[in-house]
């Protein structure tokens, strides 16, 4: 184990915090509740961004950018939306500072804004106010826009990547002619998120719908993907909302239909954030450090020379150049770490901590024998192999590692998903095991709120294509036609 890294079994929360710090992903800033994403952490986010951005473009969306500040009056136009975000809003009230004459900088009370500005917690209101000028006819639809941005939601208890006052995300906002088109968009984008989570992050997810209590403020329906972390807690990894005509009516966004009638448009919004970084860390990493799926690893292969003297290093470097040239031709990212300021053992521990999927060690004996030592991060297995055809071998190995990381996470989820049929059993499983709990619920907000108050567990989702089965609610005994997924959550 890397010195100083607390084990997951000892203190999962502490392990997570230390890992984010020691792996150089992020750190707390001098601004309370805000984080600094460090270069290595940001490079992982950039890889996520690039994949998602292409997926959005492949499904017909374009990027735009909207203001960080939103007039307070915009929020009051959609009642449930303002209620949902009111307690989290940062508000700008003045536009100037001044010197008080004693060397102190104070707010200039004469520079009060006529209308306060809200620092963007989400952009529905400013975007729908803008769309009013963009949409006149059915020919302007569908309008498919995404923006990459930062948002601010005032948080009292923060944790790096998982919950910070300011975070990075993307938010899609689309307008459609019909409800069916908007619902199809909502479902399509949920599928995009699920595909990204499973095939790039190697993280299995459950696709489902949120209950009325857990729905996005101002939405008719919220769909989500839910993932299970190694401590048995759930993490909401992405949401896609069918907004109906709520925002169109609030901001008077109408279009002239093919029949010449004035109609309100139908809307969606959908987003994922840097919270996915937290999910990536917690879904796969171990007591030695990060375990990164090769598709998202900034460095997929690291090569460490083990040598005596400059002459041997020069010979090793010449052979390494052949390997890196072959890796480059396959689009495999690599790093040749020939620093003479650190010993090989230090480098091995450093790249293990940073989750680099494949490590090659190349020594003097390997020069003579046409061999190289290869180690994989996911299983920590190592072996000495021939250097012939090594780029092909690494290409296949990276695919194998990607699949293995997913398989391990999927097995963990299956082992930690349990059906329960009584409230006593529910509480016992929740306290002793955690994980996903599939249980019958009577469909009322009152029962859902009671369970949350008494156990802190929430309904994570009603799975899509959920098997229908007759049962009774674990709390009230009232009839139920399907199980829903409960868990403690981040």
Image (spheres, helix red, strand yellow):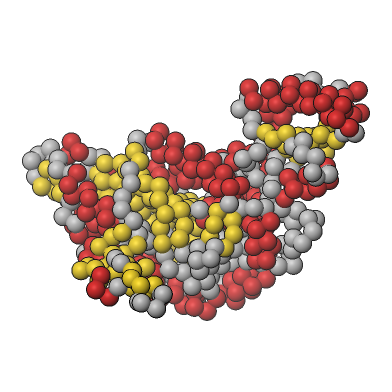
Q: Is residue 483 above or below residue 293?
A: below
Residue at the spot x=25%, y=70% of the render? 111
Residue in the image at 35% along x and 76% along y? 100
The residue closer to the viewer here, 404 or 332, is 332
Query: Is 229 displayed left or right of 131 in the figure?
Result: right
Q: Position of residue 262 (x, y in %)?
A: 10, 47
Q: Which image quadrant is residue 22 in?
A: bottom right
Image position, residue 369 (x, y; %) = 90, 23
Q: Residue at point 61% right, 47% down?
A: 40
Q: Quadrant of residue 15?
A: bottom right
* Above or below, comparing residue 191 to residue 458 in the picture: above
**Residue lying furthest left:** 260
Is residue 396 toward the left or the right of residue 450 in the image?
right
Residue at x 44%, y 39% (from the top left corner): 53
Q: Closer to the camera, 472 or 255?
A: 255
**Residue 27, position in %: x, y?**
59, 59
Regarding residue 40, the answer to whether it shows in the image is yes
């Amino acid at each position: 184990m890397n010195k100083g890294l607390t084990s997951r079994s000892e203190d999962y929360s502490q392990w997570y915090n230390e890992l984010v710090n020691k792996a150089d992903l992020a750190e707390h800033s001098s601004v309370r509740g805000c984080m600094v994403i460090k270069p290595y952490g940001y490079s992982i986010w950039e890889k996520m961004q690039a994949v998602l951005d292409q997926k959005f473009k492949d499904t017909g969306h374009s990027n735009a950018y909207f203001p960080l500040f939103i007039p307070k009056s915009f929020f009051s136009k959609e009642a449930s939306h303002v209620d949902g975000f009111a307690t989290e809003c940062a508000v700008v009230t003045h536009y100037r500072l001044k010197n008080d004459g004693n060397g102190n900088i104070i707010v200039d009370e004469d520079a009060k804004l006529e209308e306060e500005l809200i620092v963007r917690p989400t952009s529905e209101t400013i975007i729908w106010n803008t769309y009013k000028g963009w949409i006149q006819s059915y020919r302007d639809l569908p309008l498919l826009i995404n923006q990459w941005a930062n948002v601010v939601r005032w948080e009292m208890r923060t944790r790096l990547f998982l919950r910070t006052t300011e975070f990075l995300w993307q938010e899609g906002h689309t307008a459609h002619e019909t409800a069916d088109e908007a619902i199809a968009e909502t479902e399509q984008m949920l599928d995009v998120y699920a595909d990204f989570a499973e095939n790039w992050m190697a993280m299995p997810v459950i696709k489902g719908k949120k209950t009325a209590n857990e729905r996005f403020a101002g939405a008719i329906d919220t769909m989500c993907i839910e993932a299970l972390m190694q401590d048995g807690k759930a993490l909401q990894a992405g949401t896609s909302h069918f907004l109906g005509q709520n925002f169109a009516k609030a901001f008077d966004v109408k279009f002239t239909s093919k029949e010449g009638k004035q109609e309100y448009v139908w809307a969606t919004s959908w987003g994922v954030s840097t919270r996915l970084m937290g999910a990536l860390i917690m879904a796969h990493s171990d007591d030695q450090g990060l375990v990164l799926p090769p598709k998202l690893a900034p460095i997929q292969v690291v090569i460490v020379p083990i040598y005596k003297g400059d002459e041997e290093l020069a010979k090793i470097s010449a052979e390494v150049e052949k390997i890196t040239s072959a890796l480059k031709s396959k689009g495999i990212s690599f790093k040749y770490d020939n620093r003479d300021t650190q010993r090989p053992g230090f480098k091995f521990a450093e790249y293990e901590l940073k989750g680099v999927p494949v490590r090659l060690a190349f020594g003097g004996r390997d020069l003579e024998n046409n061999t190289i030592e290869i180690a994989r991060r996911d299983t920590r297995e190592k072996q000495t192999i021939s250097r012939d055809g090594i780029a092909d071998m690494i290409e296949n190995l990276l695919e194998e590692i990607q699949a293995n990381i997913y398989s391990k996470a999927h097995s963990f989820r299956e082992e930690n998903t349990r059906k329960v049929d009584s409230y006593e059993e529910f509480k016992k499983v929740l306290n002793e095991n955690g994980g996903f709990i599939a249980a019958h619920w009577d469909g009322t907000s009152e029962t859902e709120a009671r369970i949350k108050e008494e156990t802190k567990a929430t309904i994570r989702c009603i799975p899509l294509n959920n098997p229908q089965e007759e049962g009774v609610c674990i709390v009230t005994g009232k009839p139920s036609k399907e199980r829903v997924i409960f868990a403690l959550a981040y």
